[in-house]
Image: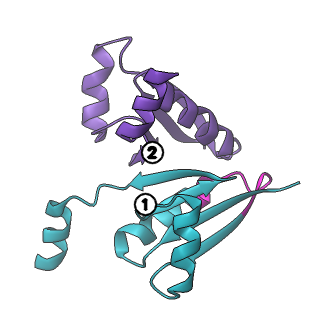
Chain colours: A cyan, B purple
């Protein structure tokens, strides 16, 4: 039986870059992957919180929550604004 | 050519639990996996910092650093002490 991998994000560039790399790296023979954009549908937020998601991006592997800090330091965000 | 996946940790129970689940989930056809225990060999610390690692556990996928927050809240740590 496939395990579940759910990637939660909120659409920001940092999340999307992490999404691509993290999902690419997962073993597709083990995991059925879904992606949930918390900003698009407010009803998903309650589910995410129930799953234990406290920040985005987050990856939930078969029920275990991994919050990912992809390095979205304030410095990085400043860089984007200047670009 | 295999991509590299390097998991950095410091030996704490939270890191080790994350290590098992994260490494199990990676696609072994894509990645050559190594695990580095920063507490065991101080010389690895400089390499980790050069790679951009700022906290542990961290997973470096082909040069991109993903800092993982596995939910080591103070409450969790308190729970361990009482157990």
Identify the residue under disc 2.
Answer: B71
User: Please, which chain is the residue tagged with disc 2 on?
Assistant: B
Q: Which residues are magenta?
A: A23-32
User: Is residue A76 found inside the magenta-colored segment of the image?
Assistant: no
Above or below residue B35? Residue A32 is: below
Q: Residue at x 31, y 31 (%)?
A: B48
Above or below residue B1? Residue A4 is: below
Q: Are marks 2 and 1 in contact (CB under 8 Å)?
A: yes
- B31 vs B57, left or right, is right
- A56 vs A66, left or right, is left
The percent coordinates of residue B24 (x first, y second) are 68, 39
How many marks the image carries: the answer is: 2
Q: Residue at x 89, y 54 (%)?
A: A1
- A2 vs B76, left or right, is right
Identify the residue under disc 1.
Answer: A54
Secondary structure found at label 2: loop
- Crowding at label 2, few (<14), some or many (≥20) Cα neighbours within 10 Å? some
Same chain under badges 2 and 1? The reply is no
The percent coordinates of residue A50 (x first, y second) are 57, 64
Please tell me which residue lies in front, B57 or B81: B81
Q: Residue at x 53, y 58 (%)?
A: A52
């Amino acid at each position: 039986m496939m395990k579940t991998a759910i990637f939660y994000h909120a659409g920001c560039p940092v999340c999307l870059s992490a999404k691509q790399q993290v999902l690419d790296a997962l073993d597709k023979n083990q995991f059925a992957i879904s992606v949930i954009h918390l900003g698009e549908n407010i009803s998903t937020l309650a589910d995410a919180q129930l799953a234990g998601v406290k920040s985005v991006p987050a990856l939930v592997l078969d029920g275990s929550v991994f919050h990912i800090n992809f390095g979205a330091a304030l410095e990085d965000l400043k860089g984007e604004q200047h670009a």
